[in-house]
């Protein structure tokens, strides 16, 4: 926040603390409170229109309107850090949040393309309809945290590629990071999830 124009959009005081004076942890970032969850998307758009942020930190994107506001913000060049409940696979199945990972489209293939697709996937039977990612994800990188696992997290370095792999029934690359609770040392391993 010392080098970029950063805004924190927080509906429940979880990021910057309660009250008019933000917690020192956000530095020079400005905090925009939303009076209710239903107004968070409007505050996100107003922030982009009126304050020209370079970075927005958003507490919990959980509704379709917020996904649309995040897409608008990204299209205007705003970098975002946000939380959303679930992991990559659950986002793909969540109708409200699917836009975060680019949305999904059904595509009908011709006979030759369907046969080539089946051959490529090692299947004997071919299907003429498949699901593809509809567009670019809003977030290039996803960090997955799990309840109760304070010293372990997964980083998906290429959201688009990971979504494509899941839609094709394959595993995707993840950087699993483990922190030693005693020493603080962090270990990184690459795994397929």
Image: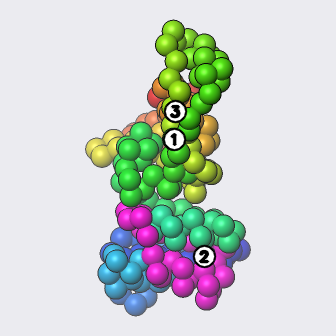
| Nearest to N terminus: mark 2 or mark 3 | 2
Task: Give the class, few, some or many, for how many residues have Cα within 10 Å of label 1's Cα (few <14, many ≥20).
Answer: few
Give the camera-side residue of 102 and 14. Answer: 102
Q: Residue at x 38, y 53 (%)?
A: 95
Q: Residue at x 46, y 36 (%)?
A: 178
**Res 1 → quadrant:** bottom right
> In the rendered image of this protein, does residue 121 appear above or below residue 162?
above
Q: Relative to residue 49, is residue 168 drawn left or right?
A: left
Residue 6 is marked as: 2
**Which stretch is magenta?**
41-65
Residue farthest to the front? Answer: 111
Q: Secondary structure at mark 1?
A: strand
Q: Relative to residue 84, is residue 139 drawn left or right?
A: right
Q: Relative to residue 91, is residue 29 drawn left or right?
A: right
> In the rendered image of this protein, does residue 8 appear above or below residue 68?
below
Q: Residue at x 51, y 41 (%)?
A: 106
Assess whether residue 81 is covered by the magenta stretch: no
Give the camera-side residue of 131 and 70. Answer: 131
Mark 3 sits on what residue? Answer: 130
| Nearest to N terminus: mark 1 or mark 2 | 2
Q: CA distance from mark 2 to mark 3?
A: 40 Å
Mark 1 sits on what residue? Answer: 106
Please state the horizontal and vertical placement of residue 82, each as a whole percent of the image.
48, 62
Q: Residue at x 41, y 39 (%)?
A: 89
Q: Secondary structure at mark 3?
A: strand
Please state the horizontal and vertical placement of residue 103, each as a whole percent of the image.
51, 50
Is residue 188 at least partly visible in the picture? Answer: no
Q: CA distance from mark 1 to mark 2?
A: 38 Å
């Amino acid at each position: 926040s010392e080098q970029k124009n950063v805004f924190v959009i927080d509906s429940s005081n979880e990021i910057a603390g309660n009250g008019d004076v933000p917690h020192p942890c956000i530095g020079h970032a400005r905090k925009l409170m939303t009076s209710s969850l239903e107004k968070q998307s409007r505050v996100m758009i107003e922030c982009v229109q009126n304050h020209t942020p370079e970075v927005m930190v958003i507490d919990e994107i959980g509704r379709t309107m917020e996904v649309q506001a995040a897409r608008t913000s990204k299209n205007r060049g705003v970098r975002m850090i946000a939380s959303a409940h679930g992991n990559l696979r659950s986002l793909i199945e969540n109708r409200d949040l699917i836009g975060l990972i680019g949305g999904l489209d059904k595509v009908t293939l011709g006979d030759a393309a369907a046969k080539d697709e089946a051959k490529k996937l090692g299947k004997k039977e071919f299907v003429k309809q498949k699901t593809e990612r509809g567009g670019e994800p809003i977030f290039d990188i996803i960090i997955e945290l799990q309840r109760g696992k304070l010293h372990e997290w997964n980083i998906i370095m290429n959201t688009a590629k990971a979504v494509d792999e899941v839609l094709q029934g394959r595993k995707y690359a993840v950087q699993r990071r483990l922190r030693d609770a005693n020493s603080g040392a962090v270990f990184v391993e690459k795994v397929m999830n």
